[in-house]
């Protein structure tokens, strides 16, 4: 049976959505989890950040090495089962230590998904048709972030209403534990579907570019790979990946703590906070697809550097709206400002995983995706949630402390991220306009 490329992309995108729901569900369960386990905000920050991110970072590169050589479908199936079981069993965790270990299991399982999916997409589509499927897959991550709050809030509402009280094994559990068990089930259903339905595609062979090939006939992204010098490649990837990770630190801090900020400062319920924050993420799905697709069209019309020029325009606008949302006390206006600002910034934050398949040498594609994840996890995931909790608990006590901590991080991190994107644009511009 032959793979139908777009069907595989949609399946991978669905898995990406599920992975983000499993990853972020704890952010909606902070208050009941703290009360049940007797833990602090800083410990919650460790569960959301370092417990997941450190192992995710360390294991990502060896996993990507296996992906570049082994059967990607089987590796991905194993990863899905591991992360889903870790989420499900978290509903039965009786201590901070056990929950910490299960978050590490979640990280180990999810570390397989992005490099395996990007590598599979690269072998399912020709070079000049990869932008759209790659963008759809990455946009699914933004969709997953949004649905983490919608699905999580709905599951929590149902659990609190007693809808699962008659179910065996989970009926007697508190609502937040029931939510974790139920959220872990979809991945266990999807794993055998992936294994039985998707064939491992033939890996694309590397071909050296023909010296006689006309630059005009080469796609802008391909020109990047041909004309980028070694020193420029180091400058580009270092500045791009680190700048993106710093931007992600601010965004992930908001993902982890903005719903709880709404609970504490606006006196809404955890499920209501989930529904409200999900609206701040919906626009990001469309923008994540739009930006790379638009930049590729502009590149073909004579602006080949647009993929890296767009962030220089969008980041200041998104940052201004993000800061304004945190300063606004009116719930509706704050939600609207956050919806636009967060969506603009999250769409930019998704660009590296789209850029790598378009620019990377074929033999290094999986490892460069893993390197993106490594930078994001060491900086974004490890530090974002933890530093917000630490700053709020240390310097900003009170119901508005989390908002003040997020505001300080945005003002500090946003301009640094923009400067690094500007540094990445220069070598990209030189290579794509050569």
Image (cartoon, rainbow, N blue to C red):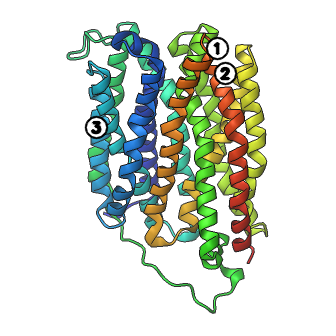
| Closer-to-camera residue (166/95) | 95
Query: Is 281 above or below relative to 243?
Result: above
- Please rate how many residues cluster around mark 1, counting C-alpha atoms within 10 Å: few if below 14, some from 14 to 19, many from 20: some
Q: Earlier in the sequence, mark 3 or mark 1?
A: 3
Work out whether 202 lies above or below 11: below
Spot the residue most to the bottom.
212
Find out whether the residues at labels 3 and 1 contact each other: C-beta distance under 8 Å.
no
Q: Which residue is mark 3?
A: 188
Label 2 Cα crowd, 10 Å radius (few <14 / some 14-19 / many 20+): many
Q: Secondary structure at mark 1?
A: loop
In this rendered view, identify the residue nearer to me: 163 or 216.
216
Instruction: Give the camera-side residue of 94 and 267.
Output: 94
For label 2, the residue is 404
Q: Which residue is mark 1?
A: 400
Task: Please identify the quarter of the rendering in which residue 234 is found.
Answer: bottom right
Q: Residue at x 64, y 75 (%)?
A: 228
State the SS at label 3: helix
Image quadrant holding the C terminus, namely: bottom right
Q: Is residue 98 visible?
A: yes
Q: Are marks 2 and 1 in contact (CB under 8 Å)?
A: yes
Q: CA distance from mark 2 to mark 1?
A: 6 Å
The label nearer to you, 3 versus 1, is 1
Q: Say whether residue 321 is left or right of residue 49.
A: right
Q: In the image, what residue occupies the spot 68% across and 27% down?
A: 407
Mark closer to the chain start, 3 or 2: 3
Real-space Cα separation, disc 3 to disc 2, in angstroms: 39 Å
Residue 415 is situated, as x and y percent measured from the top left of the image, at 73, 43
Identify the residue at horizontal 30%, vertical 32% (top origin): 102
Please report the residue visible at 39 percent of the width from the left and 16 percent of the height from the top. Answer: 39
Say which mark, if any, is on residue 223.
Answer: none
Task: Provide the secondary structure element on which disc 2 rests.
Answer: helix
The answer, for residue 187, to whether it is visible in the render is no
């Amino acid at each position: 049976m032959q793979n139908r490329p777009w069907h595989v992309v949609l399946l991978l995108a669905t898995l990406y959505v599920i992975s983000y729901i499993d990853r972020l569900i704890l952010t909606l369960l902070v208050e009941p989890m703290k009360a049940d386990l007797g833990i602090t905000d800083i410990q919650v920050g460790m569960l959301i950040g370092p417990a997941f991110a450190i192992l995710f970072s360390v294991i990502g590169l060896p996993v990507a090495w296996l992906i570049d050589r082994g059967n990607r479908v089987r590796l991905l199936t194993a990863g899905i089962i591991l992360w889903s079981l870790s989420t499900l069993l978290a509903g039965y965790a009786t201590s901070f230590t056990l929950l910490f270990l299960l978050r590490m299991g979640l990280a180990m399982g999810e570390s397989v998904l992005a490099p395996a999916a990007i590598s599979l997409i690269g072998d399912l589509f020709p070079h000049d048709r990869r932008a759209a499927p790659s963008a759809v897959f990455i946009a699914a991550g933004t969709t997953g972030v949004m649905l983490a709050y919608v699905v999580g809030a709905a599951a929590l509402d149902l659990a609190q209403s007693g809808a699962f009280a008659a179910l065996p094994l989970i009926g007697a559990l508190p609502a937040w534990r029931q939510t974790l068990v139920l959220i872990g089930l979809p991945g266990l259903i999807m794993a055998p579907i992936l294994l039985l339905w998707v064939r491992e595609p033939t890996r694309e062979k590397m071909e050296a570019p023909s010296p006689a090939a006309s630059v005009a006939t080469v796609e802008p992204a391909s020109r990047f790979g041909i004309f980028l010098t070694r020193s420029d490649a180091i400058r580009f990837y270092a500045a791009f990946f680190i700048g993106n990770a710093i931007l992600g630190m601010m965004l992930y801090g908001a993902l982890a703590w903005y719903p709880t900020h709404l609970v504490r400062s606006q006196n809404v319920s955890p499920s209501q906070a989930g529904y409200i924050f999900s609206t701040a993420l919906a626009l990001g799905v469309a923008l994540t697809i739009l930006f790379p697709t638009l930049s590729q069209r502009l590149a073909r019309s004579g602006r080949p550097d647009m993929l890296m020029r767009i962030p220089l325009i969008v980041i200041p606008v998104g940052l201004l709206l993000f800061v304004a949302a945190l300063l606004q006390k009116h719930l509706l206006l704050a939600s609207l400002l956050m919806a636009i600002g967060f969506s603009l910034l999250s769409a930019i934050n998704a660009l590296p995983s789209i850029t790598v398949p378009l620019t990377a040498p074929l033999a290094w594609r999986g490892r460069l995706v893993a390197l993106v994840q490594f930078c994001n996890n060491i900086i974004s995931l490890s530090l974002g949630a933890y530093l917000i909790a630490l700053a709020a608990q240390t310097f900003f006590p009170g119901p508005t402390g989390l908002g003040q901590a997020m505001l300080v991080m945005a003002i500090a991190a946003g301009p640094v991220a923009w400067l690094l994107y500007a540094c990445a644009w220069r070598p990209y511009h030189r290579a794509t306009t050569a």
